């Protein structure tokens, strides 16, 4: 890609427990990529070893709420008393220097991004089966059956928005899913709607 | 891909002289593909070494015209007194066993395919510049300036339909163009419109 050609915003999302984070990490392990992970902003306290600007941007609740008012988030959500959000200016800055910016976010956040940046590429990570998702949710949890059922109910509601995404990538194996997302990013750059203006301009120069 | 999952119809097209044939051949040289080239039907006589069913299906003018009447072509055209066309039944047969069927055809043919199979993937091969195309057309022709200008005029008209394609792939290098088409084929299989039904079915099975 040429310098200063705007990058793509790639939104990786899907039901809780589907393995979004693992797929995203595998994506960044692919050779010669041009991806950047978007660092979220949060009001929760840093955990041991977490670095400001690398793991998260850590800010106060007041600052976060001011930024909400000023429309400075591409998306944000509140989760167990803390805010989490994607700073719009950082994303814009990296897209403008030609980086593909990857967001790994929850389904509600993805729907907010769709409103604000409909030109982004929306990838829904799906489990290979409902049983596989239950296994994942059970496997990592030490919580009682009731909590697990609540999580499955949440996942079910999240399944319902899959049709609003551009792509559905089944997480059968992590490498396979990551490879598919990389193919999607490559293909999207050749989409007529993204290339036609550049192409018309090329033809004018004789 | 699972057996019996329907393949994609991939239409590779673009202005005359852009190098569609070379790109198509490079595409078939990529490892572990699942592509099949659609053999055209023609009324012209076989040239030395050409095999019926491999290079072309050779038929009489009467048979070709009967097939037109019976709607048996996905697309066809007349060119210097001979017919050339894509037999619909062969394409359907290969798609149904899960092959990706590749057509390499002229722009007018591609527009006919769009009418009959809008679910196909339409890739417009573009030259890196107008000058590059003129060089290619001049390079391979021994014809006078007038013929070359006629070909450039034809190419200009063909440029105008680029926006009707799903993707525009610049033929900067043949390998690059072929790689992009392969990424497009992979990505198209993850398109929500192609996967959502399968996905909903998977969720029902508990």
Image (cartoon, coloured by chain):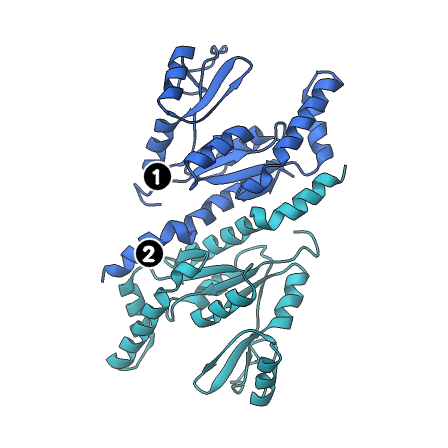
Chain colours: A cyan, B blue
User: For mark 1, what is the residue?
Assistant: B98
Q: Quadrant of the N terminus of chain B?
A: top left
Residue A190 visible somewhere in the drawing: no
Residue B106 disc label: none
The residue positioned 33% from the left and 56% from the top of the image is B199
Where on the picture, by quarter, is residue B169?
top right
Q: Nearer the viewer, mark 1 or mark 2?
A: 2
Q: Nearer the viewer, residue A132 or B141?
A: B141
Residue B33, image x, y percentages: 44, 39
Q: Marks 1 and 2, Cα distance to the nearest angstrom?
A: 18 Å
Mark 1 and mark 2 on one chain: yes
Up the image or down, B156 lies above or below A89; here it is above
Q: Nearer the viewer, residue A26 or A127?
A: A127
Q: Nearer the viewer, residue B145 or B69?
A: B69
Binning the other alpha carbons within 10 Å of mark 1 as few (below 14), some (14 to 19) or many (20 upward) gives some
Q: Residue furthest right?
A: A206
Q: Chain of mark 2?
A: B
Residue A164, image x, y percentages: 43, 60
Residue B141, image x, y percentages: 68, 19
User: For mark 2, what is the residue?
Assistant: B199
Q: Quadrant of the C terminus of chain B?
A: bottom left
The residue positioned 58% from the left and 88% from the top of the image is A60
The residue positioned 33% from the left and 59% from the top of the image is A128
The residue positioned 31% from the left and 66% from the top of the image is A133
Q: Earlier in the sequence, mark 1 or mark 2?
A: 1
Identify the element where label 2 is drawn: helix
Residue B119, image x, y percentages: 42, 42
Q: Chain of mark 1?
A: B
Up the image or down, B32 lies above or below B16; here it is below
């Amino acid at each position: 890609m040429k310098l200063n050609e705007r990058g793509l915003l790639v939104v990786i999302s899907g039901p809780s427990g589907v393995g979004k984070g693992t797929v995203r990490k595998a994506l960044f392990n692919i050779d010669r990529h041009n991806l950047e992970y978007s660092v979220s902003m949060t009001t929760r306290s840093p955990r041991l070893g977490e670095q400001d600007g690398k793991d998260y941007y850590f800010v106060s609740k007041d600052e976060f709420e001011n930024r909400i008012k000023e429309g400075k988030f591409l998306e944000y959500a509140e989760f167990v008393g803390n805010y989490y959000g994607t700073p719009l200016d950082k994303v814009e800055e990296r897209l403008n220097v030609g980086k593909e910016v990857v967001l790994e976010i929850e389904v509600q956040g993805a729907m907010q991004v769709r409103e604000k940046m409909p030109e982004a590429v929306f990838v829904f990570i799906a489990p290979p089966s409902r049983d596989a998702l239950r296994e994942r949710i059970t496997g990592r949890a030490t919580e009682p059956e009731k909590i697990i059922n609540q999580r499955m109910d949440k996942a079910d509601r999240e399944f319902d928005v899959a049709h609003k995404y551009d792509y559905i990538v089944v997480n059968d194996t992590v490498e396979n899913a990551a490879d598919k997302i990389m193919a999607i990013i490559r293909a999207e750059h050749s989409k007529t709607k993204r290339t036609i203006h550049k192409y018309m301009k090329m033809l004018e120069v004789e």
